[in-house]
Image: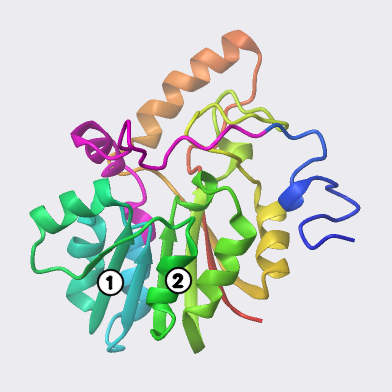
Amino acid sequence: MAANQNSKHGGKYFLPAAYVENPQTSADTAESTFWDPDTDYGATRFQEGVYKWAARLIESKQAMVIDIGCGTGHKLAALVAPVAKDWLGVDQDSAISIASRECPEGNWLCSDLSQPEVWADLAELRADLVICSDVIEHLPDPLELLHRLGALIGPTGHVLVSTPDRSRLEDRNPFGPPKNPLHIREWIPEEFKLLAESAGLEVVEVRHFFPRGYSPTVANFRRLVKRALQFRALPDRRNTMTFLLRAA
């Protein structure tokens, strides 16, 4: 049986057998770049809970932190860097050009995460915590990414990975393709746990987070009315699932 399949889920990367993926569209190309001021603004709304959790995990531990897919680095620099001994943010050129301009004192590495060269550059490093927040759904080979992340931590290190929980998204479709065209694929917790374990990682804890600035009381009331009129279930808006992992 292939490493990215099992008899229950049947499809690639432990997704349903009938799951439909989106093409990859979030990498920089010669014709266009992924990160721009609009993308940057939108990204600041999400994953704040992930980075606050990361900061609590390393507080008072003199930790080395690597953020794989750091985007423009706002959350890394504001929430994690102040409590880390050392840190490094890694992403593609359009993101790092913004990060290095807005936080010139930061440690930034520009590289395409789908290319092996970036991992060769990082091979000598060992982190106490590796963050990979809402990145894995954008990359063509998530299993390889998890293997690479695991190789960056020492025996007592951890990996913190977040990604959308497909079962909690509005207008969700269990068989894809993701509604967000920039996401190649999306998992539910049970599927992602199997994927992580197949990469030699053990799940320590799973949490779900709201987007930053999100008001669950007001928003859920509005959606409750909408769903009641449509006779549909109200999704849980804590839709960013975050896995704390360690070497198995």
Q: Which mark is residue 119?
A: 2
**First of labels 2, 1 by sequence position:** 1
SS at badge 2: helix
Q: Quadrant of residue 106?
A: bottom left
x and y percent of residue 73 in the render? Answer: 23, 57
Q: Give the left or right position of residue 161, taking residue 195 as reference.
A: left
- Image point (67%, 28%), residue name: 173
* Residue contact between numbered discs 2 and 1, judged by CB atoms under 8 Å: no
- The percent position of residue 105, horizontal first and vertical second, equals 9, 69
- Does residue 104 appear left or right of residue 87 in this picture? left
- Name the kind of residue labelled 2 in the image: Trp
Nearest the eye: 124 or 129 = 124
| Type of secondary structure dominating the magenta stretch | loop
Provide the residue designation for mark 1. Answer: 88
- In the picture, which quadrant includes the N terminus? bottom right
Q: Which residues are magenta?
A: 21-50
Q: Residue at x 38, y 75 (%)?
A: 121
Against 206, residue 55 (above or below) is: below
Q: Residue furthest top?
A: 229
Is there any visible trace of residue 69 in the rendered image? Answer: yes
